Amino acid sequence: MMSKKTLTQKRQNIDQVKQNNHLPSLHEQQLEQSIVSSWQRSTCAEIPKDRCAAPLVSLQKEGSPNALAYALEHCAQDLKHIAQQSSMVLAIGDIGSTIIWTAASAQMQRAAENVHFIAGGQWREELVGTNALALALKTQQSSCVFSNEHYMSSIHDWVCYAAPIIDPYSKQVLGVIDLSTTWQKHNSLGVLAAERCAAIIQSALLEHQKQQLFIRAFSVPQILFNGKVLVLTPRQIEILTILALCPQGLTLDSLHQAVYGERKVSIGTLKAEMSQLRDILGGMLGSRPYRLLVQVQADFLLTEQSLDAGYTDSALKFYTGVFLTKTESPFLCAWRDCLESRLSDAIFKANETDVLLKHLARSPEAIDAVERLIELMPKTHPIHQTLLKYKDH
């Protein structure tokens, strides 16, 4: 643990950096560039100056639990023990920086409640400014935010360490874990502690996902079952994608219509496909109705869930390319059109230029992102003219 004198000097240096329009080179070097960038975004976000607690939402209870919720059921006691023994508050956030679970020591419980660092607290950067939980999700790397590096003055007495929670199979970021305490207890090993807690959750995920199907349908389609890539035909991938979108199951006729539409393909052909899939999945495919009997996760489902929750940033991160570009399934084509319409609507409502620029880098054909960036960027900005030329081409 650092001495109080060292920590106090660190706080003073941060204050000096904040108060100067031109950042002093010595102090600037002592700050992570991610912190400085976050301050700049926070300043532009028009966060109310009197905001001293995160906005609260009621967490949805309906629907089936996601993988992160299942994993928490298995490791919650271990995480509670860590929080209590370390005199910290430990929080799990979803992909949009909303806290879904916390455990706190007696020393930190009241402080956490006062600033809504509790289940339902929304800690998105555009709502509360610089904080470790949101920063770890934005950068997809571990982060530490010390004392007055936080944007809200009500948490200047805190130091927070956060690490993203990564799905061990799909490698997608599912959420974030944050450990927080008072700034006087800042420890250089805090980030490692957060990473250790993330590893505990990831081990629980691994256990939970021993019978899990993960579908990648953006860019290059791929199916993972129990962490291994399955060798499937494009038609079999389409069938599994349809069943993932219809968890209640489909009759043989309904499934045939969803896959083939009006094309003249016999029912027997579909039956043969289903028989092969049942063999490949080791019986994890039910009939009457046809349905998947295994936990299913997918990049397109994560994108849809992000849009449902209003997390445009996360939705665009999951959306890495066009959904099943070669499919002729009428059901999947209609679903793709609906998803792309929702994404475009979210893009035209987005206000963060960095999110849109990253999306454009991944999807150069995203003209809707170009048009929105032209609206958001000042005409004097060097990128503005480049975007205008990009649109014309």
Image (tube, helix red, strand yellow):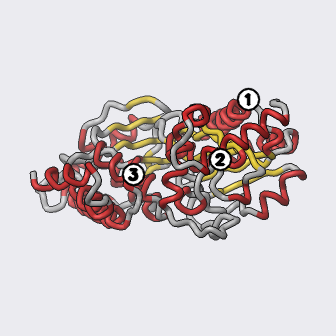
Task: Name the amino acid, label 2.
Answer: Glu
Q: Position of residue 97 (x, y in %)?
A: 58, 54
User: Which quadrant would the N terminus be assigned to in this image?
Assistant: top right
Left/right of residue 92 with respect to residue 393 in the rendered view: right
Instruction: Find numbered disc 1 in the image and state the secondary structure of the residue it sits on.
Output: loop
In the rendered image, the vertical position of residue 31 relative to residue 63, given as above or below: above
x 81%, y 44%: residue? 83
Mark 2 → mark 3, Cα distance in angstroms:
22 Å
The residue under label 3 is 355
Q: Are marks 2 and 3 in contact (CB under 8 Å)?
A: no
Mark 2 → mark 1, Cα distance in angstroms:
18 Å
Instruction: Find numbered disc 2 in the image and state the secondary structure of the residue it sits on.
Output: helix
Tag 2: Cα neighbours inside 10 Å, few (<14), some, or many (≥20)? many
- Marking on residue 198: none
Question: Which mark sits nearer the N-terminus, 2 or 1?
Answer: 2
Q: Is residue 123 or residue 222 the one in the foreground?
A: 123
Task: Name the amino acid, label 3.
Answer: Val
Q: Position of residue 157 (x, y in %)?
A: 78, 51
Closest to the camera, between mark 2 and mark 1, is: 2
- Marking on residue 189: 1
Task: Name the amino acid, label 1.
Answer: Leu
